[in-house]
Amino acid sequence: MKIRKFVLFDMETKIALKSKTINSKTYYMKYQGVLKKMMTENATEIQYYLDMRADFLNMNQLLNKEISLSFVSYECLNCYSDKEIYRQGYCKSCFFDAPNAGDWIMRPELSTAHLDKEDRDLAYEKSVQLQPHIVYLANSGNVKVGVTRETQVPTRWIDQGAHEAIEIVAVPNRYLAGITEVALKKHVGDKTNWRKMLKNEIEEVSLVEWRERLKEYIPEEAASYFIENSTVTNLNFPVIKYPEKPKSLNIIKTPSYKGVLVGIKGQYLIFEDQTVFNVRSNEGLVVSLEL
C-alpha cells in the first residue's frame, strides 16, 4: 500500500480540507483503518504517526483537540480475516502458527536460528534473529532491562515510554541478547509499570552506574560485547497534561469514546478525562477516528 503522508498546518486548515458543509452544518471526516502501533520519529519532541489506510495522521497536531474513537470490526494482521483478535494483533490460529508470532519474539533466549534449527519458518527466523541486537536499560518510571534489534533503537525505547535509556551490550544475534537479558533481570526489573510511566513518576537514577553495576552479571558468551562508552539517550514526549489516575479504555466493551487528546507517551493516547488508550495492545482492531 502506498502511504500518503500529509502534515496538518493547523486544525482550521485541516477542517477546511477534510470537511463538508451541507445545509449550514459542518460534517467532519472520519478515518477508518486497522490499528497498528504508531510510527514514531525522534525529534526535539517525539512525533507520532497513525496509519489509517488512505491517510497518515500526525497525531501531535491533534493535541488539545476533541477526537472520537469507535470500534468497527477485527482484522488479523497476518491473514487479514475478520476473526476475533486473540493476541498481539493476530487471530488465534495465526498466533499459534505464524512465524512472526513465535515464542522467541517475547522470549529471545528461545531463539534457535543461530543453530540452523527451525521453530516455524527458518528463513524468516534467520532474517530476524541473525541481526545485531542491543541489550539496554530504560527508565520509564522504573529501571528495566530489555532487548531490541539494533535497527529499532531508539524506537523500542519510545514505544515503552522511557524518558531515558542506555545500551549495555551489542551482540550479533537474538539468542545472545536473550540469555544476557535473562541473566540481568535477576538483578533489575524487566517490566514497565504502565501506570507509573503514564503518571510521569520519574525515578531519579544514574543509568551509567546501573550499567557498570550489572556488568559482572553478563554471561561469558556475551561479555566481550559490553559497550564501555555508551551514553544516555534522553527522550521528550508530547504531553500537555499527565493523568493522576489513568483509566484504560477497552474499545470493545466501550465501542464509542470521545475525548480531548492531551498527550501521547509510549503507545498510549492520553485524554483530558484521564482515559488512556494503548494503540499497540489494540492492534488488529478496525476503528474509525473522527476529528
Image (spheres, rainbow, N blue to C red):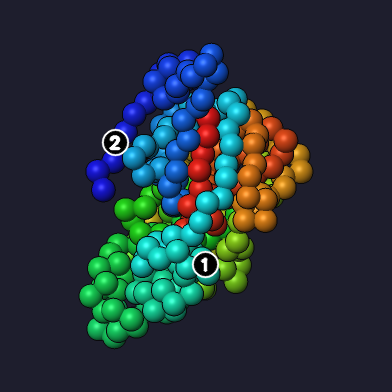
Residue placed most toward the observer, 171 or 6: 6
Mark 2 vs mark 1: which is more N-terminal?
2
At numbered mark 1, what does the secondary structure look like: helix, strand or loop? Answer: loop
At numbered mark 2, what does the secondary structure look like: helix, strand or loop? Answer: loop
Relative to residue 163, is residue 200 drawn left or right?
Answer: right
Relative to residue 60, is residue 241 drawn left or right?
Answer: right
Q: Label 2 to label 1, Cα distance in Å?
A: 29 Å
Q: Residue at x 39, y 43 (%)?
A: 51
Q: Amino acid at mark 2?
A: Arg
Relative to residue 104, is residue 251 drawn left or right?
Answer: right
Which disc, if any, is residue 279?
Answer: none
Q: Which residue is mark 2?
A: 4
Crowding near pointer 1: few (<14 within 10 Å), some, many (20+)? some
Give how far across and how far down residue 33 sits, in percent: 43, 47
Q: Amino acid at mark 1?
A: Glu
Residue placed most toward the observer, 45 or 79: 79
Q: Residue 76 is drawn in which quadrant?
A: bottom left
Q: Which residue is mark 1?
A: 84
- Residue extending farthest right: 245
Q: Residue at x 36, y 44 (%)?
A: 53
Which of pointers 2 and 1 indicates the residue nearer the eye? Answer: 1
Give how far across and how far down residue 106 sits, in percent: 47, 70
Q: Is residue 26 visible?
A: yes
Q: Are marks 2 and 1 in contact (CB under 8 Å)?
A: no
Q: Is residue 246 above or below residue 143?
A: above
Q: Is residue 215 above or below residue 162?
A: below
Residue placed most toward the observer, 148 or 60: 60
Q: Residue at x 48, y 52 (%)?
A: 286
Q: Residue at x 60, y 29 (%)?
A: 66
Q: Residue 80 is drawn in which quadrant?
A: bottom left
- Residue extending farthest front: 23
